[in-house]
Amino acid sequence: MKLYNTLTRKIDQIEPIDPPKLGFYSCGPTVYDYTHIGHLRRYTMDDFLIRTLRHAGFKVKFVQNVTDVGHLASDADTGEDKMEKGAKKYKATVWDVAKKFEDHFYNSLEKLNNLRPDNVCRVTEYIDEQIEMIKDLEQKGYTYVIDDDGVYFDTSKLDDYGKLARLDIKSLREGARVEKVVGRRNPTDFALWKFEREGENRAMVWPSPWSERGFPGWHIECSTISKDQLGDQVDIHSGGIDHIPVHHTNEIAQSETVSGKKPFVKYWVHHNFLQINGQKMSKSLGNLFTIEDIIERGFHPLALRLLFLTAHYRSEMNFTWENLAGSQKSYQKLINLVLDLHQGEVGTVDEDQVKKYEQQFFGLMEDDLKTSEALAVLWEVTKAELSKATRLKILLDFDQVLGLGLAEVKAGDLPPAVEDLLTKRQQARDEQDFTQADELRQQLKSLGYSVKDTPQGQKINKLD
């Protein structure tokens, strides 16, 4: 198994610290608002990776944090608290907001058939551990206090600070990388613990050795949780490319200082962004689509999962409703094929052909997760002149890492996307929205099904 390692800037062979065990830490969500499809792409690509690692024989322990305490709105140590911002927006307590959007995050991933982490660790459950780690850093001489602001990490004490992002520390100016903080000694110094300022009246605050009311900086949570769950050293740590210059760089600084310079992470995996119609996602453009938006437009969530496979995780991906429609047709074609393979004379399994195609497919998945090339092998199998039994076995084996739900498709079933449209059409008819019902009839036709309304209800038939 090989992966591109951000730390070394090359594709490295995966050799776990304690084989075959492999510790996998994923930077989780900040739960103050709805999870959008940009988030979903990143976590679904993690899912493909974890499934592939397990298929390759690694015993993966998958750990993910949930940031349910308000770190500040930027990578810097300034700005509005994200949880407080969410509470104001939704007119609820910060605790209720955290619960609501954590549930939405994992429900969204479940719809995409993503595996749940072995351990989900909420930051509010690790306050004492974070304080203890900061005390350890303080005792080692790596911290200083800015009055009325917080406890900061002194990055000038490290010779190799910024090695992940390959930062040119000498050329950095205050305010060029993060916002300026009065009293910060070096542009790269960062907050470990923030103090509540007079009049703020925050909902999430805790006592500490440095103040009666305060809260942790953003970066300390991942160092603390990963140490508790996976030890001083982690095999694989994943996140978005936006985390490289600040968040992950600061995790390394804290963790390696606490551990006595043990390498914190062996392999860093970073995912690229999702664009919408060639534009960056933003609230102002109204393009922060959720999984509910996908479903309401008549698309099956697994069609989105299939679409994510078409671009490499390190490449920027452009989402359009047109390419999702194409993915829906491809997904439907795949489901229809699996249904057909269950029926009639299926023949015997040709093990040589199984081995041939699986070597190609898993070889690509295990070579830096080449999902689009692996997907091409899948489509080649769908057209190959093989017995039904052979094709079915190959497709189901592939699906152990693709997670498209092919094993759940049985003879006589209607494909999930067809079931969804049929249910929505019945709802439209019940509400006497016949225009919508006709539109849904056309969508069903595009998937290869005709529907008739009878006194006994909708009758659906597959078109020849």
Image: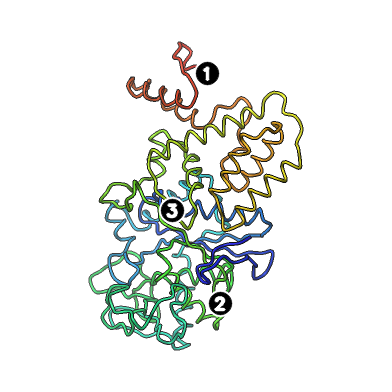
Please give the name of the residue rendered at 33% of the width and 56% of the height, measured from the top-left corner.
Answer: 93
**Quadrant of residue 272 within the rendered picture:** bottom left
Please state which of residues 108 and 204 is positioned toward the viewer in this rendering: 108
Q: Disc 3 marks which residue?
A: 102
Left or right: residue 169 versus residue 27 is left
Q: Disc 2 marks which residue?
A: 263
Please give the name of the residue rendered at 76% of the width and 41% of the height, measured from the top-left corner.
Answer: 351
Badge 3: few (under 14), some or many (20 or more) residues near its Cα, within 10 Å? many
Going from the N terminus, do you reach mark 3 or mark 1 first?
3
Q: Disc 3 on helix, strand or loop? A: helix
Residue 397 sits above or below residue 28 on the image: above
State the separation of the CA atoms marked 3 and 1: 40 Å
Mark in the foreground, 3 or 1: 1
Coordinates of residue 311 in the picture (x, y in percent)? 48, 50
Which quarter shows the N terminus? bottom right
Coordinates of residue 60 in the picture (x, y in percent)? 62, 60
Going from the N terminus, do you reach mark 2 or mark 3 first?
3
Badge 1: few (under 14), some or many (20 or more) residues near its Cα, within 10 Å? few
Residue 281 sits above or below residue 264 on the image: above
Mark in the foreground, 2 or 3: 2
Q: Residue furthest left?
A: 199
* Amino acid at dot 1: Asn
Please give the name of the residue rendered at 54% of the width and 32% of the height, measured from the top-left corner.
Answer: 333
State the separation of the CA atoms marked 2 and 1: 60 Å
Coordinates of residue 227 in the picture (x, y in percent)? 55, 72
Please state which of residues 272 and 156 is positioned toward the viewer in this rendering: 272
State the separation of the CA atoms marked 2 and 3: 31 Å
* Amino acid at dot 2: Pro
Q: Disc 1 marks which residue?
A: 461
